[in-house]
Image (spheres, grey):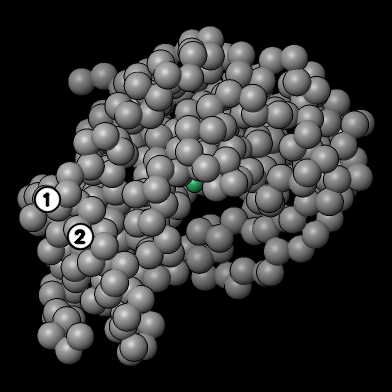
């Protein structure tokens, strides 16, 4: 077995990008998507520090690291980007405090997205920025919103591990509200040999992203990210097709069943009438249920488990956590008879 590499290509035409990458859920690195934009000229920490020192940003603590170590997580706070980058220069290996913030408009104007922004509703697109020190990481997880992602690397290098949702049964997803969409495997604590074995086992993609490059991460993919040095990225989360958008809006904390079912909706042209029927059913149940929020979620999770069994199927259970998750959902099934 080998670890999949991610191809590097110049920006393809819109229809080709849609057909070859979005519909096939194929990660790719686009080498020139933002060339000639003002932000692409700021490819070092010092250049960003000089030009954008006054930009207000939100800094947070590494949530997973604090949770694992049993420490309390302080609330996010605001500071200027210049002050944060000075902190990173003083502590380049800091693994705790990082920037995670909606991209301010004046920064966004330095990185205009002029391609791929209008597959669907442009108003559904939004942007986020990240900056962190050289030993920070994003724990293996998938995002909740069913959006395809374009991540531009401003400065510094980051290692990306991407894993297709079809491998979810190998990833021991954690079934707890405070760790929704996270894996029970901690790549951040593995040796390089362990990591390589794990990536081979999960048919992962792996790549190091350099300044000026943009990685395309397909919706609902698992991702684990390592900062190899102090680094900053700006992310465009693309607008969704109407089906994925409606489905995502029902589930602020999507289970692995939602993750699995979401893939059936990627290609609008091939969404079947029975898929639209289950989406309508979920929306109706979600709107009409009058009980508590936890009961509403229990019913919706039960319906998704059932729909997944009907329309996708299951891999064999590999962890006790997954067995317990399904048992818990089925035990709640009696609620369904009440609506
Ligand atoms: Fe993420």
Q: Which residue is mark 1?
A: 311
**Residue 138, x across and y down, in percent:** 51, 46
What residue is at 56 percent from the left and 32 percent from the top? 117
Q: Residues within 10 Å of mark 2 (few under 14, many from 20)?
A: some
Q: Quadrant of residue 170?
A: top left
Q: Residues within 10 Å of mark 1 (few under 14, many from 20)?
A: few
Relative to 108, is 38 above or below?
above
For the N terminus, give its image quadrant.
Answer: top left
Left or right for 10, reference 294: right
Q: Which mark is residue 278?
A: 2
Nearer to the camera, 106 or 44: 106
Left or right for 227, reference 184: right
Ranked by sequence position, the earlier of labels 1 and 2 is: 2
Numbered disc 1: secondary structure: helix
Q: Are marks 1 and 2 in contact (CB under 8 Å)?
A: yes
Indicate if the residue with disc 2 has its beta carbon within 8 Å of ligand 1. no
Relative to 9, is 230 above or below?
below
**Residue 285, x across and y down, in percent:** 27, 75
What residue is at 74 percent from the left and 37 percent from the top? 108
**Residue 164, x across and y down, in percent:** 30, 36
Residue 205 seen by the camera: no
Q: Residue furthest top?
A: 10
What residue is at 13 percent from the left and 75 percent from the top? 330
Q: Quadrant of residue 40?
A: top right
């Amino acid at each position: 077995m080998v670890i999949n590499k991610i191809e590097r290509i110049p920006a393809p035409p819109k229809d080709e990008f849609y057909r070859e990458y979005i519909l096939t859920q194929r990660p790719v690195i686009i080498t020139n998507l933002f060339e000639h934009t003002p932000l692409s000229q700021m490819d070092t920490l010092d250049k960003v520090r000089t030009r954008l020192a006054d930009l207000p940003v939100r800094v947070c603590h590494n949530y997973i690291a604090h949770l694992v170590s049993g420490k309390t997580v302080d609330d996010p706070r605001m500071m200027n980007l210049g002050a944060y980058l000075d902190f990173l220069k003083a502590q380049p290996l800091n693994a705790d405090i990082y920037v995670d913030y909606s991209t301010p408009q004046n920064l966004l104007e330095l990185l205009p997205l002029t391609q791929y922004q209008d597959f669907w509703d442009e108003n559904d697109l939004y942007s986020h920025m990240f900056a962190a020190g050289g030993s920070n990481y994003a724990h293996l997880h998938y995002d909740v919103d069913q959006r395809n992602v374009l991540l531009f690397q401003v400065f510094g290098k980051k290692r990306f591990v991407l894993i297709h949702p079809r491998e979810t049964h190998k990833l021991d997803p954690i079934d707890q509200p405070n760790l929704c969409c996270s894996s029970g495997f901690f790549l951040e604590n593995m040796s390089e040999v362990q990591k390589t074995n794990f990536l081979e086992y999960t048919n992962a993609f792996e790549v190091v992203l350099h300044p000026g490059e943009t990685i395309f991460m397909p919706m609902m993919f698992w991702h684990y990210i390592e900062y190899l040095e102090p680094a900053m990225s700006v992310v465009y989360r693309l607008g969704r097709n109407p089906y994925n958008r409606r489905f995502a809006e029902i589930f602020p904390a999507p289970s692995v069943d939602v993750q699995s079912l979401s893939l059936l909706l990627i290609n609008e042209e091939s969404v079947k009438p029975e898929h639209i029927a289950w989406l309508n059913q979920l929306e109706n149940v979600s709107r009409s249920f009058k009980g508590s929020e936890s009961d509403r979620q229990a019913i919706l999770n039960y319906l998704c488990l059932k729909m997944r069994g009907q329309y996708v199927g299951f891999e064999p259970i590999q962890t006790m956590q997954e067995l317990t998750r399904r048992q818990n959902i089925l035990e709640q099934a009696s609620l369904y008879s009440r609506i």
